[in-house]
Image (spheres, rainbow, N blue to C red):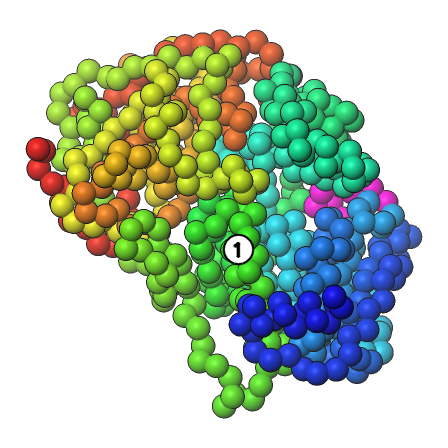
Amino acid sequence: MSGRLVARLAAAGLRLPPTRPGPVRVTRDIPIRARDGVVLRTDHYAPGGRAAPTVLIRTPYGRGGPLRLLGRLLAARGRHAVIQSCRGTGGSGGTFAPLVHERDDGVDTLDWLRRQPWWAGALGMFGVSYQGFAQWALAADAGEDLRAMVAVVTASATRDSTYAGESFALDTVLTWAELLHAQTVPWLARQRELKRGQPRLAAALDHLPLAGADRVATGVTIPFFQEWLRHHTPEAAYWRERVFADRVARVRAPVVMVTGWHDIFLPAQLDDHATLRAAGTRPRLVIGPWTHGSPGLFVAALREGLTWLDVHLDGPPDDERPPRAAPVRVHVGGPGGGWRDLPDWPPPAVETAWHLHSGGELAVRPPGASTPDEFRYDPADPTPSLGGPLLVAKRAGRVDNRQVETRPDVLTYTSAPLAGPVEVIGPVRAELHVRSELPHLDVFVRLCDVDTRGRSWNVCDGLVRVTPERLPADASGVLRVPVSLWPTAYRFAAGHRLRVQVAGGAHPRWARNPGTGEPLGTAVTLRAGWRQVLHDPAHPSVLLLPIVHSAPPMPPI
């Protein structure tokens, strides 16, 4: 089947507007030379030889597969699609060092584009995940030539996602390191490893010290993995040249953002959205029921992205343009949810405190006098992570949490059945009062929806790493621990119950806390210890929900 036919079928399947007739010319492996002499291999999909807007995609994942389809779709819509392999990947020269060279290499590539006879002075960019980081690295320097951006499950700054809650996103970082390395091994060997269920990666996620985990997973030392283990403190100078958040407000081009409620970069992407709004721009934001690798996300990104580029690069006259879409479109999970258009993010909501009570109860009334609940966390048998925001789609997203909730190191607090629906849209946070045997600990909080069959479905969660310097205890040894959970849009149906989990970790999504304060990469000693969760009038532990519609819980049966 020809590439042109595949593109036409894909456009029809995505319900895109008709493409422009005409041939698509493809030139592969163009050598574009960066300022230091490194050659960046690039493919060009041209809509004939005419001058037309250009869409740039810079990627470390190779230029084949879905990107070939995207290149043809763009060219069939009258765009020059330029798809480039980041240095050290896909045949490009140099060494891949995440985030280090993307600004300079992007600027040099843009300089090359401006010297081509088919350059029309209008640039768009499209990027998923790391491709989006490469967009943000260049965007502020592209000037008025930049007319539109499509940013999919990505952000301008990766540091806070790498160290979410000041812990370490072990599963995401090590899985990504293994994925990048896998591009260098023979295809058949890779297929065998995948068929076996990636036992080397599984062993690496449990390995200590973490500084040896990359060799267990791949057989080689991964330089950036070692660097990220060393430079994890918030003040580390290492990250200053690797984050681009301070440049976002300078971008004036229209931006569409597509992400999912269970995406690893969702909080950081919403930070970018807030920055653009504060700068006076009107980005479009689409958040669906997706994980980082959901097939539905890819389809939505193509549909939203191609339409956005059509409108903002060289769209039809104003009187022929489709009506402007709502600036925010979100999918509300849960029974009776569905897609909602909003005027902005987050929407107006009433932040409502749901209090933890003795006996495992969750209720809106304040707590009375009570004794703390206690559990013992043992990093040698760490509380496992189930579902949620992970890099690999098949392990991510909504799962039934009953298995983990039976563990003695997990506390649960559950509301009475709801008399009517409760709809939550916006940021979610918790404030817990905790006493700990050890000064170094993690606090994990997860919100679940318990259906009428008793199944407990995760909605959103978050974790905070506690150190004596960051969160000192009061005179009685009590810590007030604020936990930012992933934002959400979810409808808890009548008859369902809200549930809050509290645990001492979620491994391997977050690296286990050894309890010793040893350095992240070299820690090997594991100390178990008890934790107490307080819920009395002097120490109210609460989950704070942005409620846009609610009904009181049903009275107990």
Quadrant of the frame with the N terminus: bottom right
Q: Magenta part mainly helix, strand or loop? A: loop
Q: Which sits in the foreground, 169 or 330?
A: 330
Q: Is residue 237 visible?
A: no
Give yes or no for residue 97 being in the magenta stretch.
yes
Residue 278 position (above or below residue 232) = below
Q: Is residue 124 left or right of residue 234?
A: right
Residue 224, how many percent across, how many down? 72, 34
Residue closest to the far right: 37
Q: Going 68% across and 24% down the picture, which residue do you hit?
A: 200
Q: Which sits in the foreground, 297 or 489?
A: 297
- Using a 10 Å C-alpha cutoff, classify the residue at mark 1 as few (fewer than 14 neighbours), some (14 to 19) or many (20 or more): many
Give yes or no for residue 143 being in the magenta stretch.
no
Residue 85 position (above or below residue 365) = below
Q: Is residue 526 visible?
A: yes
Residue 396 position (above or below residue 106) = above
Quadrant of the frame with the C terminus: top left
Amino acid on which disc 1 is placed: Leu
Q: Going 88% across and 54% down the picture, which residue do you hit?
A: 39
Residue 166, how many percent across, how many down? 51, 31
Residue 270, how many percent across, how many down? 47, 52
Q: Going 82% across and 45% down the picture, which residue do you hit?
A: 88
Residue 455, how many percent across, how many down? 31, 35
Magenta region, residue range? 94-103
Q: Going 70% across and 78% down the picture, which residue do you hit?
A: 78
The quarter holding residue 57 reads bottom right
Q: Which residue is mark 1?
A: 297
